[in-house]
Amino acid sequence: LTDLNRSQDALRVLLAVPEQDTSYGEARADATEILARAGAFKRALAMVRKALVKRATHTGLIASHSLTFELSGDLKTARTVFRKALVAQPKSIDIRLSFGAMEERLGQSRRAVRIVEPVLDDSPNETRALNFIAYSLADRGVQLRRAGRMLRKAVRLAPNDGYILDSY
């Protein structure tokens, strides 16, 4: 609905998801992103903070919380949201990938790679991390052999993943 310029309709659907529903966190995260992208930062922050009380470790909520600060121009707080989340969940692959993606969007590719690299220490076959790091390195034209090895490994592990195939 958002892609069809029907954000208000999308919000109505997302906000109708009850708290006890397993998709509540994702629905609130999506609603927060819609509001933040529309510039309704106060409303987005109020919504995501309330949802985080119920789902404190929900990666989508954490990412949309940070995104709200990022879009409002408060990059320090956007980073702080992710740093605090990593203190609470240092092994969270999704938080590391979301944090890395934000740094990549902000032009901080080296920092992004440093944030995501620890994923491979614990999960050397994590295809999203392999692809993320390889793409970042290749895009900057550095460590191309390493990037090539990582992409080949990712393709071998997930031969039908469109994101990986696009990077390859």
Image (cartoon, helix red, strand yellow):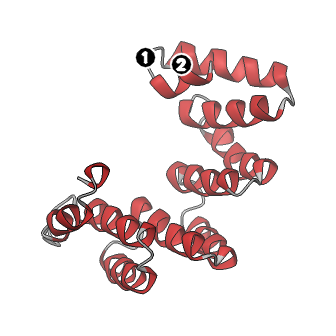
Q: Residue at x 52, y 67 (%)?
A: 67
17 or 70: nearer the viewer: 70
Q: Is residue 121 above or below residue 16?
A: above
In the shown orientation, is residue 159 left or right of residue 86? left
Mark 2, residue position: 165
Residue depicted at x 26% and y 63%: 7
Q: How many marks?
A: 2
Determine crowd level at label 2: few under 14, some 14-19, many 20+ residues with C-alpha closer than 10 A: some
Residue 57 in the image: state x and y as whole percent: 42, 67
Residue 160, label in figure = 1
Distance CA(mark 2)–CA(mark 1): 7 Å
> On screen, 149 above or below 73?
above
The picture places residue 83, in percent across and down from the top left corner, at 64, 69
> Is residue 51 shown left or right of residue 150?
left
What residue is at 29 percent from the left and 68 percent from the top? 28
Tell me which amino acid carries mark 2.
Leu
> In the figure, residue 111 lies in which quadrant?
bottom right
- The image position of residue 158, as x and y in percent, is 48, 19
Q: Which element is circle 2 on?
A: helix
Contact (CB < 8 A) between labels 2 and 1? yes
The front one of 33 and 101 is: 33
**Camera-side residue: 140 or 54?**
140
The image quarter containing residue 148 is top right
Three-letter code for the amino acid on which mark 1 is drawn: Asn
Q: Residue 81, how many percent across, how many down?
A: 58, 74
Q: Horizontally, is 1 left or right of 46 in the view? A: left
Image quadrant occupied by the C terminus: top right
> Does residue 38 appear left or right of residue 75 in this picture?
left
